[in-house]
Amino acid sequence: MEQPGGERIPGSITGVKRPLPEDFSFVPARGPGSFQPSPAEACPTNGFRSAPSSAGGNWLVTESVELIPSMATGYLAPQQQETIRRQVVERLAARDPMLRHVMEVKIVCNQRRNFINISVRKDYVTLCYQEHHEGIYYCFFLSDKIEPFVTITAVHPDDGKLHRLTRSQVVALARTIDNFKAKFGISGESYHYTGLRERQETDEFVDSGGTQRGNKAHSSHFHLKLRVSTKMTPDRLPVYQLFDLGALREAVEPVRYNFSRTTLPWNEVYPLLMQDAV
């Protein structure tokens, strides 16, 4: 499809303006995934020994992400634990740059030895697909908010989630969405987009003391929601198979709202993405 000025809009334009009927195509499939650590609790402290930094060539963590023998037992001060966490992230990022964002690193201790624990961060647990184009990772997450949407973000391996895309990144996003749809057998999709100005106004509301940052309604970073078949959620997140999703949809207002979000077809949301791009 072409815009009024003749510019061709990439990507699928098979969407609809309102929430989808439940009978459009979805073929379950397994998608790839790949994953900034957050601070962990310190072990109880009653002393301190200095910890060298990897910046000076002194590593407390081996290439296989194990503590060196002198760190494997005994007391670790908070400063040492933070150094170890940073070095673990460096080791992981050397294998895959996205791991610095996907993995949570925690140092745990018992009376016998110290351990490095690595787990997937909560906000990356539902990552089901990603592609890498010109230094940016386009990540697709199944929503954990009891709604039939996949949330798409753009992540720089060093800077994290992008707040605003460039025009060329929007084009790359369109190509990635087409590949995602082809892999998962999706058609007839539509989109819900929270624009740049809305996100900025929400941040201004929070900064003015309107609410705590953890309670704000929108994320600051760019995100696009792709409406999918209702059955994709329990197929990919089995926890939803443990209760009656249909009954919740009918009786619980927040769930009903999530299922009734106004959506747009791709040929209408694409100009909005370009309008916010730099």
Image (tube, rainbow, N blue to C red):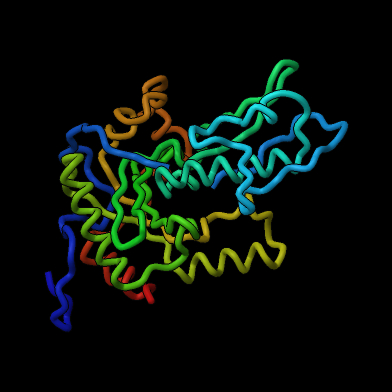
- Residue 86 lies left or right of residue 209; in this view the side is left
Give how far across and how far down residue 24 sits, in percent: 17, 41
Q: Residue at x 52, y 60 (%)?
A: 220
**Is 2 located above or below residue 113 in the figure?**
below
Q: For this rendering, which residue is in front, 83 or 71?
A: 71
Give how far across and how far down residue 134 sits, in percent: 30, 63
Give how far across and how far down residue 109 sits, in percent: 70, 24
- Residue 118 lies left or right of residue 223; in this view the side is right
**Is 75 located above or below residue 206 in the figure?**
above
Q: In the image as oriented, which residue stretches furthest toward the top?
A: 112
Q: For this rendering, which residue is in front, 75 or 170?
A: 75
The answer to whether residue 262 is visible is no
Q: Residue at x 20, y 55 (%)?
A: 15
**Count of numbered circles on the image:** 0
Q: In the image as oriented, which residue stretches furthest toward the front?
A: 57
Indicate the quadrant where residue 32 lies: top left
Q: Considering the image in quadrants, where does the N terminus appear?
A: bottom left
Q: Residue at x 20, y 39 (%)?
A: 184
Give how far across and how far down residue 163 sits, in percent: 47, 64
Indicate the quadrant where residue 278 lies: bottom left
